[in-house]
């Protein structure tokens, strides 16, 4: 029987411990369990984040940074259901950017909506101030301040956004608006990667993993203003 190696204590900073390690059969079993779980997790992650839980009626809210395809879907949604207004949120566009002439994403979105056929009397731009972080939440707070000035209190909104940003958007809008307003969400698929195989492209990995981290931050660490 071989004795364990002796290690001389150095001011009691070290101590010897024996730990079990898997054999090759053990590693094989771990792989046989872990790989299917990883595959299932990858397939379920995007649907979890890109949630659609629509609450038609009330106000339709579009996040201003969304691409043109999202606005087309938003207009179809607006024309299919009865909404009281079509609102677009978003903060400033950086100076020098191709779309900087619109000043804010809310104004840019309003121009897109009008160009796609909506009447000016139903479209409302609700710009947000410039911030370095938590832009979605600040946009939601700006919307709440705008709603507080309206003659008729809002009781329901539907937020339309792109891809896996949806779950975080609904969470932050609900936090900003409070429980007196019911918040629904509609996720429009992103066009730069396949949602069913998002892990096969760099755009999909950046988007999904980034939104997963952002959602957990918003859910467990972010406390609002």
Image (tube, rainbow, N blue to C red):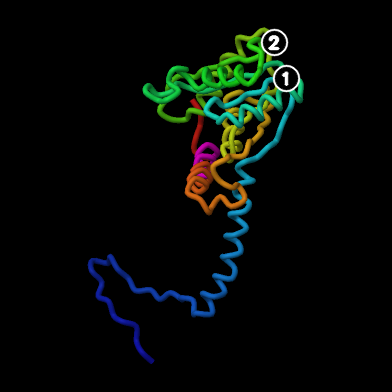
Separation of disc 1 and disc 2 at Cα? Answer: 14 Å
- Find the magenta span and give its range: 212-219
Lateral position of residue 6 relative to residue 44, left or right: left
Reading the image, the residue beneath label 1 is 83
Reading the image, the residue beneath label 2 is 152
The answer to whether residue 216 is magenta is yes
Where, by quadrant of the figure, is residue 89 drawn? top right
Where, by quadrant of the figure, is residue 38 drawn? bottom right
Element marked by disc 2:
loop
Image point (25%, 75%), residue name: 8
Q: Position of residue 144 (x, y in %)?
A: 58, 18
Q: Position of residue 177 (x, y in %)?
A: 61, 23
Q: Nearer the viewer, residue 92 or 111?
A: 111
Q: Quadrant of the N terminus?
A: bottom left
Report the number of discs.
2
Lateral position of residue 213 relative to residue 173, left or right: left
Q: Position of residue 210 (x, y in %)?
A: 49, 43
Image point (49%, 45%), residue name: 203
Task: Indicate whether 197 appears above or below 177.
Answer: below
Residue situated furthest top in the rendering:
151
The answer to whether residue 166 is magenta is no
For label 1, the crowd category at 10 Å Cα-Cα, with few meaning under 14, some 14 to 19 and many 20 or more, is some
Looking at the image, tell me whether mark 1 or mark 2 is earlier in sequence order.
1
Image point (64%, 46%), residue name: 47
Residue situated furthest bottom in the rendering:
1
Numbered disc in front, either 1 or 2: 1
Q: Nearer the viewer, residue 145 or 79?
A: 79
State yes or no: discs 1 and 2 in contact (Cβ < 8 Å): no
Element marked by disc 1:
loop
């Amino acid at each position: 029987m071989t004795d364990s190696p002796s290690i001389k204590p150095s001011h009691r900073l070290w101590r010897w411990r024996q730990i079990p390690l898997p054999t090759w059969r053990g590693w094989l079993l771990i792989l046989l369990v872990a790989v299917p779980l990883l595959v299932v997790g990858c397939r379920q992650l995007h649907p979890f984040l890109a949630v659609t839980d629509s609450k038609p009626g009330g106000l339709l809210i579009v996040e201003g940074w969304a691409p043109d395809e999202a606005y087309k879907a938003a207009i179809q949604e607006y024309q299919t259901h009865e909404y009281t207004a079509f609102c677009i949120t978003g903060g400033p566009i950086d100076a020098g950017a191709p779309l900087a002439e619109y000043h804010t994403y809310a104004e840019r979105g309003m121009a897109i909506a009008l160009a796609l056929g909506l009447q000016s009397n139903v479209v409302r731009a609700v710009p947000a101030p410039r911030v370095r972080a938590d832009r979605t939440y600040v946009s939601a707070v700006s919307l709440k301040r705008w709603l507080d000035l309206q003659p008729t209190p809002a009781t329901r909104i539907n937020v339309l956004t792109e891809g896996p940003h949806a779950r975080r958007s609904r969470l932050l809008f609900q936090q900003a608006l409070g429980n007196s307003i019911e918040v629904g969400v509609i996720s429009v698929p992103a066009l730069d990667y396949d949602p069913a195989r998002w892990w096969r492209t760099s755009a999909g990995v950046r988007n999904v993993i980034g939104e997963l981290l952002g959602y957990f931050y918003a859910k467990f660490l972010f406390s609002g203003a």
